[in-house]
Image (cartoon, helix red, strand yellow):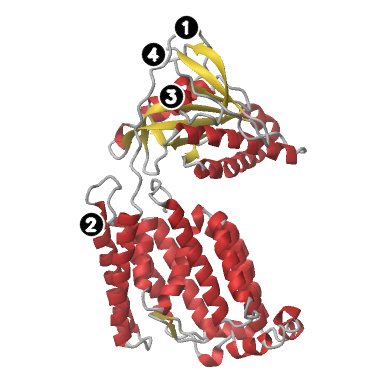
Amino acid sequence: MPTGNPRREREPAIQWLRAAVFGGATLGSLLVLPFYPATAAPILALTVGALALFSPGLAVLAFVVALTLPLMAANILVGGMVLVVGVAAVQYFGQDDAKAFTVMLLAFIAVRFGAAWGVVALAGYVLGTAEGAVAVLIACLAIEAAGVLLGKPNLGSVVTGGSPENAIVSLERLRDVAANDPLAFGWLIPAVKAVDPGRVLAAFTGASHVALLVVQPLAWAGGAAMAGSLKRRDDDPRRALVGIGAAVAAALALALASIAAVAVLGGGVDAGFLVTSALFSALVAVGGAAVWELVFPPLPAVQRPRAEPRRGGMSAEDADVDELLSLIASAEEELASKHTTTAVVMITDMKSFSKMTEEEGSVMSAKLIQRHRDLLIPIITKHGGNGKSTGGDGLVAAFRMESEALAAAVEMQQALAGYNASKTSERELQVRIGIASGELVLDKGGRPFIGAALNMAARVMNLADGGQVMTVDDVVTNAEAGRFRLHSHGRFDLKNIAHPVVVYEVLWAEGQEPVIYTAPTS
């Protein structure tokens, strides 16, 4: 599920597949590194898989911690380094549904079965050119490092340059530790006494085929970038056919480049195994791309009929939205690469931002902006929205359904209220929210770019105060009945809006479920 792509069909199945990858990789790693009691490894694998369903970032952390103990028992310095690096990288690996970490796990699994090049091509195709290239480059480096630590000259089709005499992680030592109640930590003091940084350094500096160790990650990144660059737009009718071909072409190109590199630079990998890996990788690329495009195709934009707005007459002062209007004015060249649809749009704005900047200073204000983004954007995503920053203290998001947008707005205000209650010594974060629906131009990520609905949402938002959610009558009419409590503020003449609109406030309470609301019938 790459960032920048629309939501896809059967997304819950994708989440279960991710959980299976996390659980399977955990179990496989713990079986390779014998340490835990026989029943502990499956339990840990199930735990990591379950966490991947609900909190991918927490699952990444759990995987790192579960793997660290065996590594510490084998070599406490290596285990400590893995723990520090792993915890430091959790924020990167855990973001965006842990896609980059999932690629790394799949690469480790695939390299064992000679299908790594196919996974590389799929990573570039699914994640995109840049993100896929970075993910597989890191994965290749991690595989090479694992080979050096285990003293393996190669892991599958990947040359690692390790040697048995320089192995740092001894499986024999782990088996001895595992036989003597490892969770009693009797191995800890001897492991500390045996620390030898020079030996660890010698294992890496003494690795063979150094040139190949540099070429391999770059080749992987190039293969992923190739697959990503050949991908067609989601609205292209030939998307699936071209996508499958692109994944196969990238896998075979990477296989040829890797085989040529091994032939020129050496590496000791059996030529027959490399050819078999190339064919197997091509099959994996075909199957993976076909499943991604045919089983999990992108959801089409939903265009729903709208009720006629009720007319009336009552004026209200409306603040300017210069930043959005300037964005509209500069949109001509971009418009050709975007698509127009009918969607529900949400726009937010922090209350008294200018005053906060003056009183708190730029640095603290920037921190508060980032905190509010970190808190609210995941809620938008949870409710099916595609959101981003407006470039300042606001957010903008598109939803397929009115109920999704209203539910997200209520949860956002509840989350901010909870945050403010827990941070009584800090300045309160108060946000006003406007929601409207209509024609909208979306960027490649399915997020609002320009459109009448965006203007309407901005105008309605400016009627709100901090902590309020404002919307209009056509959103209310099309929202799912029985979920929201609303209060009508009457009809308003909004700046640059042709007809008066009825403005509703979405009422909410911290920690309470929304009360029953029945949509109007006239």
Mark 3: which amino acid?
A: Asn
Q: Gap in Å between the C-alphas at discs 2 and 4? A: 45 Å
Q: Nearer the viewer, residue 403 or 125?
A: 403
The residue wearing badge 2 is: 241
Q: Nearer the viewer, residue 255 or 303?
A: 303
The residue wearing badge 4 is: 498
Secondary structure of the residue carrying numbered label 1? loop
Between circles 2 and 4, the one closer to the viewer is: 2
Instruction: Bin the neighbour count of mark 3 within 10 Å (Cα to Cα): few under 14, some 14-19, many 20 and up.
Output: many
Q: Position of residue 302 (x, y in %)?
A: 35, 36
Mark 4: which amino acid?
A: Ala
Residue 198 in sight in this render:
yes
Q: Is residue 193 left or right of residue 131?
A: right
Mark 1: which amino acid?
A: Gly
Secondary structure of the residue carrying numbered label 2? helix
The residue wearing badge 1 is: 313
- Looking at the picture, does residue 346 appear above or below residue 119? above
Between circles 1 and 3, the one closer to the viewer is: 1
Q: Gap in Å between the C-alphas at discs 1 and 3? A: 20 Å
Q: Position of residue 470 (x, y in %)?
A: 54, 24
Mark closest to the chain's N terminus, 1 or 3: 1
Q: Nearer the viewer, residue 487 or 493?
A: 487
Q: Position of residue 21 (x, y in %)?
A: 48, 66
Q: Gap in Å between the C-alphas at discs 1 and 2? A: 54 Å
